[in-house]
């Protein structure tokens, strides 16, 4: 059950790719502003095919702290539960 929750959080990030994410750098580490549009734009193709590119995976990892918040969106939650959503998080190695 716990892994399903984390997977759902990851999937939420993918679905919430439709909300812009402004990224800043703090001490050399990229930090997400939890703006889903940025993630949505970076992972648009992956959302359709389930096959993320390096840019999508990088954005997804930056937004990892925001995933649980994104999962509160029913659209994101639904995507996370799909085979494409599972595959995206697996390929990007995001829990």
Image: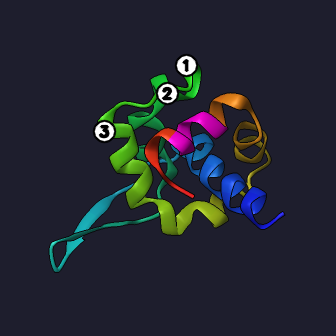
Q: Quadrant of the C terminus?
A: bottom right
Q: Quadrant of the N terminus?
A: bottom right
Disc 1, disc 2: CB below 8 Å?
Answer: yes
Query: Is residue 18 shown to the viewer in this render?
Result: no
Camera-side residue: 4 or 60?
A: 4
Callout 1: SS: helix
- Quick one: which residue is furthest to the right in this view? 1
Camera-side residue: 24 or 93?
A: 93
Residue tagged by mark 3?
55
Disc 1 packing (10 Å; few <14; some 14–19; many ≥20): few
User: Residue at 45% of width from left, 34% of height from top?
Assistant: 43
Residue 22 x, y percent position in the rendering = 34, 57
Residue 2 x, y percent position in the rendering = 77, 67
Q: Which mark is residue 46?
A: 2
If you read the primary sequence from the N terminus, does the residue marked by circle 3 or circle 2 appear first?
2
* Mark 1 vs mark 3, CA separation in Å: 15 Å
User: Residue at 68% of width from left, 61% of height from top?
Assistant: 6
Residue 39 x, y percent position in the rendering = 44, 45
Q: Is residue 32 positioned above or below 88 on the image? A: below
Report whether 3 appears left or right of 94: right
* Mark 1 vs mark 2, CA separation in Å: 5 Å
Callout 3: SS: helix
Callout 2: SS: helix
Query: Is residue 58 shown to the viewer in this render?
Result: yes
Disc 3 packing (10 Å; few <14; some 14–19; many ≥20): few
Residue tagged by mark 1?
49
Q: Which residues are magenta?
A: 86-90
């Amino acid at each position: 059950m716990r892994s399903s929750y984390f997977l759902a959080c990851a999937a939420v990030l993918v679905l919430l790719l439709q909300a812009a994410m402004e990224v800043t750098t703090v001490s050399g580490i990229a930090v997400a502003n939890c703006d889903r549009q940025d993630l949505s734009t970076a992972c648009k193709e992956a959302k359709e095919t389930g096959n993320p590119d390096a840019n999508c995976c990088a954005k997804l990892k930056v937004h990892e702290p925001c995933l649980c918040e994104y999962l509160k969106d029913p659209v994101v939650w639904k995507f996370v539960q799909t085979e494409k959503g599972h595959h995206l998080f697996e390929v990007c190695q995001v829990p």
